[in-house]
Image (tube, rainbow, N blue to C red):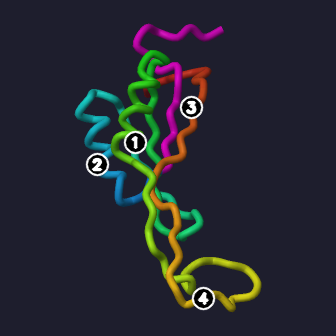
Amino acid sequence: MTMVDQGSPTKLVMMVVSDTDADELMAALVERGIPATKVGSSGGFLRRGNVTIFSGVEESAVDNVLGIVNEICPARTELVPVQTLPFIGDTAFSAEPIEVRAGGAIVFVLNVDRFQRI
């Protein structure tokens, strides 16, 4: 059985955020002393760039991290031309742009069974 040292992360917070929010979120986490690693990713409905940020923290810090994400990465709406959306099937849609949800974050909080700094 591996014992967790005091101060070792017991939770891994994975945050998938928009490219537009990533730098500000990273700065806010680091400013508050929360370790974070940024990895470029892509995907999503609008096929825009995303960033995945990983942060290993103690359980008591999880709510603080989530509060920072809520503050920096609000969901918002944008008008997008229908032609740029990845619909499958009939493309006989209106030429008018449609409103879609953009931004926000997807956050996973995982248990850390083992942490090792090499």
How far is mark 4 from mark 2, CA to CA? 36 Å
- Is label 4 or label 3 in front? 4
- Is label 4 or label 1 in front? 4
Hey, what amino acid is under mark 3?
Val
Above or below, 20 against 114 in this view is below
Residue 101: horizontal and vertical position, in percent?
51, 61
Q: Is-magenta flag for residue 41?
A: no
Q: What stretch is highlighted in magenta?
A: 1-16
How far is mark 3 from mark 2, CA to CA? 21 Å
Hey, what amino acid is under mark 1?
Thr
Q: Return the disc, 2 or 1, that comes first in the chain's sequence.
A: 2
Q: Return the disc, 3 or 1, that comes first in the chain's sequence.
A: 1
Above or below, 38 against 67 in this view is below
Quadrant in which the C terminus appears? top left
Residue 109: horizontal and vertical position, in percent?
56, 31
Q: Is residue 1 left or right of residue 47?
A: right
Q: Is the magenta stretch mostly helix, strand or loop?
A: loop
At a point 36% along the width and 52% down the height, the residue shown is: 22
Are the residues tagged 4 and 2 within 8 Å (C-beta)? no
Secondary element type, mark 4: loop
| Residue picked out by circle 3 | 109
At a point 39% along the width and 26% down the height, the residue shown is: 64
Secondary element type, mark 1: strand
| Residue picked out by circle 4 | 94
Disc number for residue 24: 2
Residue 31: horizontal and vertical position, in percent?
23, 34
Quadrant in which the N terminus appears? top right
Q: Return the disc, 4 or 2, that comes first in the chain's sequence.
A: 2
Disc number for residue 37: 1
- Is label 2 or label 1 in front? 2
